[in-house]
Image: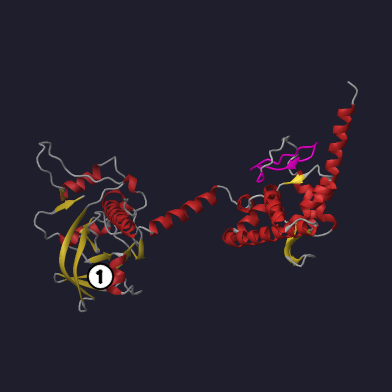
Amino acid sequence: MREWFSKLRHVFRREDVARGLREELDAHFEIEVRERIAGGEPEQEARAKARRRFGSPALIQDRAMDAWAVGFWDILLQDLRYAARTLWRAPAFTIVALLSLAVGIGASTAIFSLMNALLWKTLPVPEPGRLALVWPHDGTGARQSFSFNHTMFRSFRERSTVFAGVSASWLIDSSNVILDSNGPNAGPVRFGLVSGDYFATLGVQPVLGRTFTMDEDRVPGGSPIAVISYGFWQRKFNAAPDIVGRTLRMNQTVYTIVGVAARDFRGDWPGHPADLWLPLRTCVKPLDQTSRL
Amino acid sequence: MPNRWLTTGGPGSSISGMSTVDVPPERLEFLQGTLDVLILRSLQLAPNHAYGISQFLEHQSEHEFVVDNGTLYPALQRLLQRQWISAQWKTSPHARRARYYRLTPLGRRQLISAESRWRRFVEAMGRILAAEA
C-alpha cells in the first residue's frame, strides 16, 4: 500500500528519479574504480574490471525504474507519448485526420440531437409512456387527417373506458400578440387551443397561477383566459412575478393570463413548441369546429 | 517481476535476477524478500551507499553472496517506496559524492521481525534436515 502511494506521488517526477539514479550509478562506479586503484591496480585495468563487474548502467537503470512502474498505466502513457510525437512530426496527416474526425463527430452529434428532440425524447410530462395520440380513421385507407370534430370528441371523451383522461389540442400559428393589451408587440406566437382537461390529462403543473379546468369548456366563447409557457414568460415578460392577472391582446380579444406552465413544457407536438394555450371554447368561431386530439 | 534467486555453495555464486553481468549462476529459488532483509541488516550498523552495501554482504558472507547491481538497485528502490530506508546525498570518505541510505524506524521494526522469522525458518529446516530417517 505504502509502495503504491510512493509510486503515485512520483508519477510526474519520473524524470527526476531517473536522473538521480544515473548520478548515483556514476558515483558508484567511480568509487569502485577508486578502490581498485587504491588496491594497486593500474587505472586502465581497474576501469575495465570494474566495468565488467558493475554491469551495464543502462540496464540497471531500466530495472530500477521498473520498480516505479504502475503497471499497464505506464505502458499506456509511453504509448501515448510516442503517438503524440509521431503525429507532431506529420502535421499534414494529423490535420486532415483531425478535421475528418471533427466533421464526422459534429455532424453525427447534430443529427442525433435533432432526432432526439423530435423523435425519441419523451415529452416533459410525468408519465409520457401512458399517453396516446388518437385520431379517426374511416376505414377506407385514404389520406387521413388528424381532425376530430368537436361533438365527436366530446362523446369519445364521455364514453371512453380505456383512457384515464381524454383531451384535445390544436395548434395555430398566429399573428401578433400585444402584451398587456396596450404594451409592446410581442410578435407572432404559436398557441394551442386545448380542452379544459388538457393540462390535467398530461399531468402538467403550473409554475405560477393555475392551468385550465373542466369549467373552461363549459362556457362557450366565455371569459378569455390564457396559460402561457415558461419560456414565453421569461422572454416576453422578463419573468415578472405579477404575471398572473396581466393581459394579452390577440386579434382584438383581450386574454387574462391565469398561469404559467411548467418549465420544460412546450405542448404535445415536438418541433412545434407552443407559447401559450387558450381554452377551445374561446375560439368557437373557426368554421368547422375541428379539433385535434 | 524477476524472482530473486539465491545460490549457496561455491565461489562466484550470486544473488541475481536476470543478471546484468555475464556470470551465469546456478539458480535455486529461495525466500522472496531475502535480499531486502540483507540490505536492511547491512544498514543497521551505519548508513551506507550501494557499493558499500554490496561489499558488506560479500565480505560478511565470505563471498557466498555476490550481489548483482541489476538486483540490488531495484531492491533499493522498493525499500525506498516502502519507506523502510531513506536516502541522502553525502560526501564519501573518498571525497566523492554518493547517495547514502539509512534505516528508518519502520525499517528497523521490519528487520527485527524478519530476523525472528528467519531464525524460526532456519531452526525448522535444521530439524527436518537433521531428523533421523
Q: Residue lying at the far top in this picture: please name it.
A: B133
In the rendered structure, the answer to whether residue B32 lies left or right of residue A95 reads right
Residue at horizontal 80 percent and vertical 49 percent from the top: B57
Q: Is residue A183 above or below residue B68?
A: below
Residue under label 1 = A256
Q: Secondary structure at mark 1?
A: strand
Q: Quadrant of residue A219?
A: bottom left
Q: Magenta stretch: give its range.
A: B1-21
Residue at horizontal 67 percent and vertical 57 percent from the top: A25
Q: At which x and y percent is residue A70?
A: 59, 51
In the rendered structure, the answer to whether residue B83 lies left or right of residue A86 reads right
In the rendered structure, the answer to whether residue B129 lies left or right of residue A133 reads right
Q: At which x and y percent is residue A279?
A: 22, 60
Between A56 and A247, the residue placed more toward the observer is: A56
Residue at horizontal 11 percent and vertical 59 percent from the top: A286
Q: Quadrant of residue A8?
A: bottom right
Q: Is residue B110 magenta?
A: no
Between B37 and A42, the residue placed more toward the observer is: A42
- For residue A184, say whether it is visible: yes
Report the predominant secondary structure element of the magenta stretch.
loop
Between B98 and A186, the residue placed more toward the observer is: B98
Say which chain tag 1 marks. A
Q: Is residue B11 magenta?
A: yes
Q: Amino acid at mark 1?
A: Thr
Quadrant the C terminus of chain B occupies: top right
- For residue A197, say whether it is visible: no
Residue at horizontal 88 percent and vertical 36 percent from the top: B123
Q: At which x and y percent is residue A200?
A: 32, 54
Q: Residues within 10 Å of mark 1 (few under 14, many from 20)?
A: many
